[in-house]
Amino acid sequence: MARPDYHFLYIDKTLDAEWLFIASRRYWERFRPMVIDDLDLVGYLPPQRTVAITTLARRDMAKMIADLIKKTYPTARYDPLVYDYVEEMKLTLDGRADLQQRFGLPEDLPETLKKKRKSG
């Protein structure tokens, strides 16, 4: 999938501030998603724009959040991260930042880099 027009990092309201400031600090510094705790904000985007929503949640809230996103924003790229401990979430998000993998997988290269690789 190409890079989305908008990327949100949804942090469930049941999580403490350490989930943002400790677990996702390096991820946010690398990718700069818009941090939200209210999914209603996504609804204000123009419908023709592509959206990705990375969610941070514990197991007890993950299914409810997944159901809500799939029902309300069916065209959004949904990237769920489900961990019960801040330290585990931090390992995953730091790994994504280190590998430059916003969604845990290699992303498409920008056209300029593709051309450089072909010619070089």
Image (tube, helix red, strand yellow):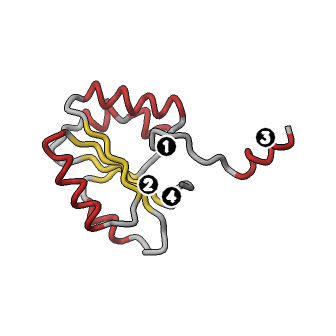
Quarter residue 68 falls in: bottom left
Helix, strand or loop under label 1 = helix
Badge 1 local density, few (<14 within 10 Å), some, or many (20+)? some
Q: Residue at x 79, y 48 (%)?
A: 115
Cβ atoms at labels 1 and 4 below 8 Å apart: no
Q: Mark 1 and mark 2 in contact (Cβ < 8 Å)?
A: yes
Q: Find the distance from the CA under tag 2 to the CA under tag 3.
A: 27 Å
On residue 31, the disc is 1
Residue contact between numbered discs 3 and 4, judged by CB atoms under 8 Å: no
Quick one: label 3, few (<14), some, or many (20+) residues within 10 Å? few
Q: Earlier in the sequence, mark 2 or mark 1?
A: 2
**Residue type at tag 3:** Arg
Asked if the residue at tag 4 contacts the one at tag 2, i.e. Cβ–Cβ closer than 8 Å, the answer is yes
The local crowd at label 4, few if under 14, some if 14 to 19, many if 20 or more residues have their Cα within 10 Å, is some
> Helix or strand or loop: what does disc 3 sit on?
helix
Counting residues from the start of the chain, the first of labels 1 and 3 encountered is 1
Residue 103 drawn at (x, y percent):
45, 43
Residues under labels 2 and 1: Cα distance?
A: 9 Å
Residue at figure coordinates x 34%, y 65% from the top left: 42
Q: Position of residue 106 (x, y in %)?
A: 55, 40
Q: Amino acid at mark 2?
A: His
Q: Earlier in the sequence, mark 1 or mark 4?
A: 4
Q: Nearer the viewer, mark 1 or mark 3?
A: 3
116, above or below 88, in the image: below
Q: Is residue 58 shown above or below 48?
A: above
- Mark 1 → mark 4, Cα distance in angstroms: 12 Å
Disc 4, SS = loop
| Residue that badge 2 annotates | 7
According to the picture, the residue beneath numbered tag 4 turns out to be 4
Question: Which residue in the structure is indicated by mark 3?
Answer: 117
CA–CA distance between discs 2 and 4?
6 Å
